[in-house]
Amino acid sequence: MSWGLLVKTMEPVEPETASTNDPSKFVLEIAQAKMDSLQEKIPQDAACVTADTIVHLDQNILGKPKDVQDAKKMMQMLSGTSHYVSTAYVIQYKKQISRVVQTKVHMKTIDASLLELYLQQAQVLDKAGAYGIQEHAGFFVESIEGSLTNVIGLPLYEIFQDLESLAIISK
């Protein structure tokens, strides 16, 4: 559903690095850097949304794994824990709105043989924290506190509210 919007995807050119280890500030800094890198390419009358998602356990920030071994290490870290998924997004349209949405995820302890099977079958390298709740890893998640769409990758309710407040989407 596009709500009557013409959507175009663009690749930001900035590397995904931040100057802080505070999870909320880290993810917001990356989303803002993505927006800043696209400023020259955005038409005057267009809205732009950038976002970034991380998984974090305490102050350990987990982005996308480098390889399957890194994914295994991440999943072992998250196994049997409660951790957070944080997504920051920036919307630019006449003015700028930025927000961080955080969801607490309770994951069961994952048996070693089940983890090996998961790593063989799941798309782990393109997911923050090496898991997608909407895919195989959903079997490991006992419950969440907060936005499901945030854990999937983009907090749709919150973005929709902000698009409405900017009159990009109307009721």
Image: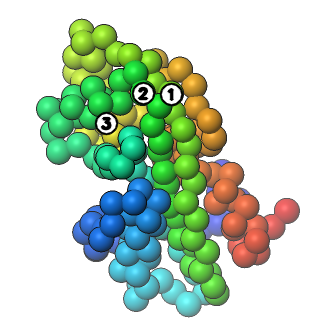
Left or right relative to 10: residue 100: right
| Mark sitting earlier along the chain (3/1) | 1
CB atoms of marks 3 and 1 within 8 Å? no
Q: Amino acid at mark 1?
A: His
Label 3, on which residue? 130
Label 2, on which residue? 81
The mark found on residue 106 in the picture is: 1
Q: Position of residue 157 (x, y in %)?
A: 68, 52
Name the residue at the front extreme.
Answer: 58
Marks 2 and 3 sit apart, C-alpha to C-alpha, by: 15 Å
Of the two numbered discs 3 and 1 in the rendering, the one whose residue sits closer to the viewer:
1
Q: Position of residue 40 (x, y in %)?
A: 40, 88
Disc 2: CA contacts within 10 A as few (<14), some (14-19) or many (>=20): some
| Mark sitting earlier along the chain (2/1) | 2
Q: Amino acid at mark 2?
A: Thr
Q: In this view of the protein, can residue 11 be seen by the observer? A: no
CB atoms of marks 2 and 3 within 8 Å? no
